[in-house]
Amino acid sequence: MSAERHSIPASEMQKSLEEHSDFEEPHTEGTLRGWLATFGNLQLTNCKWYSYVSKREFLSDFTPSQISWIGSVPLALQFIVGAISGKLFDKGFFHALMVTGSLLLLFSSFMLSLAQPQHFYQVILSQGVGMGIAMGILLLPSLGLVSQYFRKQRAVAMGILIASGALGAVIYPILLNHVIGKPGLGFPWAVRFVAFINLGQLVTANLIMKPRAVGIRREPVDMGKFGTILRILFLGFWGIFFPYFYLQLFSGEHGVSPNFLTWAIPLLNAGATLGRFTPNFVADRYGSLNVIIPSGLLSGGLVWALLGAKTTAGVTIFALAYGFVSGAFLTLATPAVAAFSQSPTLNDVGLRMGIGCLFIGVAVLTGNPIAGSLLDPPRDLWWRPLTFSCTTLFAGTSGLVVARQALVKRKGVQYV
């Protein structure tokens, strides 16, 4: 969710791509430039912000539903703008995109440090709109660059990126919560510390990431019934991020130790580190749909089980477990889209992923505010948003089951 780092399983589709694609230069697996591109992308995956930075005293006058827009807007823009930047990357504007996105991200970060308490519009403009557009500019081009250098080792390269992004999601919250609580530092300097770290990472990424001169034969794309899988994934993404935005608030209202609250989200992301890494290799062997379906079912069940997690131990177990299964669902959404490609060269995968990003962006933008409204503060009726999240996850996963059966019938294989 992150914006998120995904790989296409290297199975039958991968073999087809190697046989039918026209490259202007011979493909060399795992070159130094390829691993430098991976390392540069690793720097970009860690340049992230999280909405709970602003949930404490800084915006205490606003409801959870209102504050959730601060996290939903940049996450949605990361997908929506990414659909556009991915197309520009195909046209050869990689370096222009990297410089533009990096400058906008840094500018927005330092503007966020100037935001005043209880000034919601200042936070939503800098963190929501500015950073969201910046990450959208950087996301798909950087991932597309890594895909140019790897075929057989693509799962390994993408797995490193996915795990590193989740690891950054563990470290940053701890750093931010620690600095915010220090006298004389607070929110402004917490933001500036992270912005300076991002500055070093962005400079490194821009210096070492270089695209290959690759040309792939383009054919007319028949989207067919592609809209069905997008509507299915829309339902899943509508509800899957609820714990990422509200777990800390839920824990605080149900008697969990205040000293533990700042660890709730890092633990969730720690579980996601494994959940976003391991499924890439499993999906290479057994198929992305065969792995994403149980991940969706387990995610939906765990969301409802959160009602019983009212102790430190309970929240810890939930955070690690949900992080793992939801991380798998998020990771495998893109390969699931690619699985429905009917092109022998996979030349329509980029277009499908771009359109998929638009659908996912809208789901992310609206899902958490809807859940926050259902919470109905100050009464905080937790069963209502949890039911919404659980229901949408189950509905989306049920749709994936039906779609899988249709794909199995079309391809004549079970590993899809």
Image: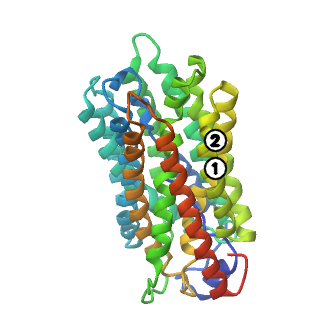
Residue 375 screen position, x and y as percent: 42, 37
Residue with the mark numbered 2: 305
Label 2 sits on a secondary structure element that is: helix
Residue with the mark numbered 1: 301
| Location of residue 80 with respect to 26 vertically, above or below | above
| Location of residue 66 with respect to 416 vertically, above or below | above
Residue 57 screen position, x and y as percent: 38, 20
Q: Residue furthest top?
A: 183
The residue drawn where x is 47% and y is 42% is 384
Q: Tell me if 266 is positioned left or right of 103 in this view.
A: right
Q: Nearer the viewer, residue 31 or 329?
A: 329
| Location of residue 102 with respect to 25 vertically, above or below | above
Q: Tell me if 212 is positioned left or right of 110 in this view.
A: right
The residue drawn where x is 33% and y is 26% is 59
Badge 2: few (under 14), some or many (20 or more) residues near its Cα, within 10 Å?
some
The residue drawn where x is 53% and y is 35% is 247
Label 1 sits on a secondary structure element that is: helix
State whether residue 160 appears in this view.
no
Badge 1: few (under 14), some or many (20 or more) residues near its Cα, within 10 Å?
some
Q: Tell me if 410 is positioned left or right of 142 in this view.
A: right
Instruction: Tell me which amino acid carries mark 2.
Output: Ala
Image quarter hosting the C terminus? bottom right
Q: Tell me if 29 is positioned left or right of 68 in this view.
A: right
Q: In the image, which disc is placed on residue 358?
A: none
Q: Nearer the viewer, residue 383 or 98?
A: 383
Instruction: Tell me which amino acid carries mark 1.
Output: Gly
| Location of residue 280 with respect to 172 vertically, above or below | below
The reply to whether dot 1 and dot 2 touch (C-beta < 8 Å) is yes
State whether residue 178 appears in this view.
yes
Q: Nearer the viewer, residue 73 or 25?
A: 73
Gap in angstroms between the C-alphas marked 1 and 2: 6 Å
Residue 382 screen position, x and y as percent: 49, 36
